[in-house]
Amino acid sequence: MTAFRDFNFKLLVIEGLMYWDDTLKPAFSLRDHMRTLGVDDLDAYVEEKELEYTVLDEPRAYFEALEIPTEMLASVEALTFDGGLQVFQECAPVWDGEDDLFDIRSLDDLDLLPNLKLFDGGSELEFMLPGSLEILAARGIETR
């Protein structure tokens, strides 16, 4: 089992493979999952439970347990950090992007992506993790 050290870094990988490339299946839908639990109005549920600024337990459990095969990780050539990523909305459906909920806190998981060539969102990454641009550059990973 491939173990990620930074959950938020794993979410970036999942975004690319599940929602952009459509290679990691099935695509997780929080709304569909919650409907199976009897929750029809997800936004109201989140507000009622005061979960606006947190990753919901259901997607956290799903994504933490999600196995990503080594060969699929080797296919990742680019990662993107952007507040509007689908995976972030699946984790925190009313998240407004105005806090550090999805900040990357470690680049230790770069070792899992041997063919990574581009990190899009470098200025955001440097803000979250000072010194990260130098780490990426030392690995030959372009940023923009």
Image (tube, rainbow, N blue to C red):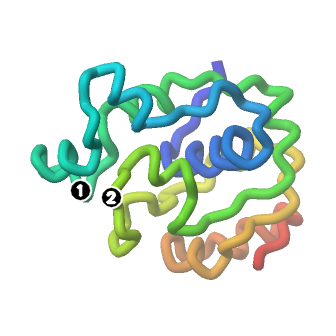
Name the residue type under label 2.
Val
Tell me: residue 114, above or below residue 100.
above
Question: How packed is label 2: few (under 14 Cα within 10 Å), some, or many (20 or more)?
Answer: some
Q: Which mark is residue 94?
A: 2
Q: Which mark is residue 77?
A: none
Q: Residue at x 25, y 23 (%)?
A: 38
In the picture provided, is 32 more to the left or to the right than 98?
right
Res. 68 image quadrant: top right
From the image, tell me which residue sits under label 1. 52
Q: Nearer the viewer, residue 15 or 1?
A: 15
Q: Residue at x 61, y 75 (%)?
A: 131
Circle 2 sits in a helix, a strand or a loop, which is it? Answer: loop
Asked if disc 2 and disc 1 are in contact, CB closer than 8 Å, the reply is yes
In the picture provided, is 80 more to the left or to the right than 101?
right
Residue 27 drawn at (x, y percent): 62, 32
In the picture provided, is 50 more to the left or to the right than 101?
left
Residue 59 drawn at (x, y percent): 41, 34
For the N terminus, the image quarter is: top right
Report how far apart the C-alphas of labels 2 and 1 lie in the structure: 6 Å
Residue 11 drawn at (x, y percent): 56, 46
Name the residue type under label 1.
Glu
Q: Residue at x 75, y 65 (%)?
A: 119
Tell me: residue 2, above or below residue 6.
above
Q: Which numbered disc flags the more N-terminal residue, 2 or 1?
A: 1
Question: How packed is label 1: few (under 14 Cα within 10 Å), some, or many (20 or more)?
Answer: some
For the C terminus, the image quarter is: bottom right
In the picture provided, is 6 more to the left or to the right than 16?
left
